[in-house]
Amino acid sequence: MAGNIFLEVVTPEKIVVSETIQSVTAPGSEGEFGVLVGHTPFLATLKLGTLHFKDEAGKERAVFINGGFAETLPNKVTVLAESAERRSDIDAARSKAALERAQKRLESKETTVDFDRAKLALARAQARLSLAESRKMDGFQ
């Protein structure tokens, strides 16, 4: 089915994406899912990962998503995320530093370390760094 849909990615602080697109693929908690125009309405929980979409011109775009919810309608997808960043906005050096901090916390012998929180910080940093580094491979600088 040819046509475009409207995508909004919103966090408590800002609107990250608000544009007409061709398709979107999201990291659902039950598995990745894709949406095209005319999709059946549904709600889904999202896990940490990368939301990929094709803009109106067919160019691949990506956004880091740190969990949240997605509402899919036949002509619109709304993502309410805990946090989100466009690939072009991710600071690779900052992500690498966060990754190293999380690794040190997990390797620590201190009893005051919250290991669950450190594991989540490590996963976030890995996902952000991976997405930022993929920008270099795609020619996005």
Image (tube, rainbow, N blue to C red):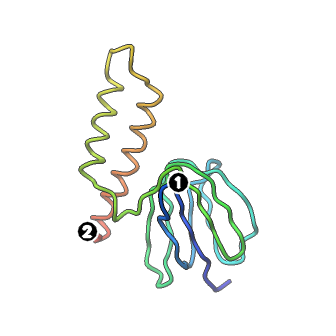
For mark 2, give the secondary structure.
loop
What secondary structure is found at the residue carrying circle 1?
loop
Residue 131 point in image, percent of width and height: 37, 57
Position of 130 with respect to 27 (left or right) is left
In the drawing, does residue 2 fall left or right of residue 116? right
Q: Quadrant location of residue 76?
A: bottom right
Residue 52 horizontal/vertical position (percent): 49, 65
Dot 1 alpha-carbon crowd within 10 angstroms: few under 14, some 14 to 19, many 20 or more: few
Q: Nearer the viewer, residue 138 or 93?
A: 93
Using residue 135 as the reference point, say whether residue 53 is left or right of it: right
Kindly identify which numbered label has been placed on residue 23: none
Residue 120 drawn at (x, y percent): 45, 36
Quarter of the image for residue 139 reads bottom left
Give, as a three-letter code, the residue at label 2.
Gln
Q: Rounded to the nearest whole Å, what is the CA distance between mark 2 and mark 1? A: 27 Å
Q: Dot 2: within a 10 Å radius of its alpha carbon, few (fewer than 14), some, or many (20 or more) residues?
A: few
Coordinates of residue 136 in the picture (x, y in percent): 27, 64
Residue lying at 58% horizontally and 51% vertically, measured from the top left = 68
The amino acid beneath tag 1 is Pro
Give me the residue at 27% from left, 48% from top: 94
Q: In what quadrant of the picture does the C terminus appear?
A: bottom left
In the image, 94: left or right of 27? left
Q: Label 2 belongs to which residue?
A: 141
Q: Residue at x 68, y 83 (%)?
A: 1
The image shows residue 106, relative to residue 111, as above or below, that is below
* In this view, the mark in front (2 or 1): 1
- Residue assigned mark 1: 12
Marks 2 and 1, the one that precedes in the sequence: 1
Total numbered circles: 2
